[in-house]
Amino acid sequence: MKYIIALIPSPLKKVYANHKKRQYAKSIIGKNVYCPICKSEFKSFADYGIQIRDNALCHKCNSVERHRLLYLFLESKFNFFKSDSEQHILHFAPERFFYNIFKDIDNVKYFPCDLYPELYTYDEDVKVKKADLTKIPFKDSTFDFIICNHVLEHVTNDKLAMNELYRVMKRGGAGIFQVPIDYSREKTYEDFTISTPEGRLKAFGQHDHVRWYGQDYKSRLEQAGFNVIENDFVNSFTPADQYKYGLMNSELIYYCEKTYN
């Protein structure tokens, strides 16, 4: 088959590729779903995931359920994107669509970080800084708000990482620390003898995860000092609106505060 494809002239390949793009564009036209991040409407969101989920991936900005839920939460609860107060925001593993929003808010001093900043090709003035979550390169009590979305499940010493997040958060500050959670598990499952990508995929659901968090995730964050609110914000939406925004009705938001006490 590959040999046959190699014989097809390049102009014909381009014609076919453009035809497929037009077909795809027509197939997603509709107004059944709406992405609040990129303000786009479609017939449905795309299927996505290692274990395929329907109505999950935005065709334009590539957001998935957890991203849209976080955006709606920040917008609804805090008017976060139009706040007049100055905020220092730390953002681990910055998604492009959130990066584009935060870097352009006048009153926000934005610090996007990752252990591998070279993987980010965001050609902007605000550079992604190298940072190890278990040794965050900032002073105590620096940040008003921290976003750490689906990162802790990759970190071997998550207790140290949580302590570091607490250390760099200001008193009165807050953060959202989302992770994949298997609510059928009472306790988090981790086994560091499992080190191969194949083994981790089978044990933890993804080749680069090192644990499955369970119902004890809240208490693990509390042990670091946070006041943790498990917010069932997603169920403030009707089932129809959950479908419209492409949300998972089982996802809780882990809103973590560093209180003044």
Image: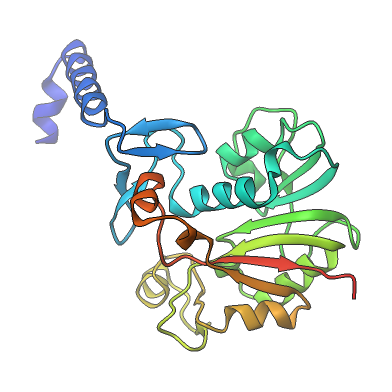
Asked if residue 93 can be seen in this view, the reply is no
257, 216: nearer the viewer: 257
Residue 179: % across, % down:
54, 66
Q: How many marks?
A: 0
Q: Quadrant of the C terminus?
A: bottom right
Q: Determine whether 190 is above or below 243 in the image.
A: below
The figure's colour scheme reads rainbow
Q: Which quadrant would residue 11 be assigned to in this image? A: top left
| Residue 139 horizontal side relative to residue 199, left or right | right
Q: Determine whether 166 is above or below 90 in the image.
A: below
Residue 224: % across, % down:
75, 78
Q: Quadrant of the N terminus?
A: top left
Asked if residue 62 can be seen in this view, the reply is yes
Q: Which quadrant would residue 52 be assigned to in this image? A: bottom left
Residue 96: % across, % down:
57, 38
Residue drawn at x 68%, y 73% as measured from the top left:
228
Q: Determine whether 86 is above or below 197 in the image.
A: above
Residue drawn at x 40%, y 59% as measured from the top left:
248
| Residue 140 horizontal side relative to residue 128, left or right | right
Residue drawn at x 65%, y 74% as measured from the top left:
158
Residue reaching furthest to the bottom: 186
| Residue 159 horizontal side relative to residue 67, left or right | right
| Residue 214 horizontal side relative to residue 135, left or right | left
Residue 246: % across, % down:
38, 49
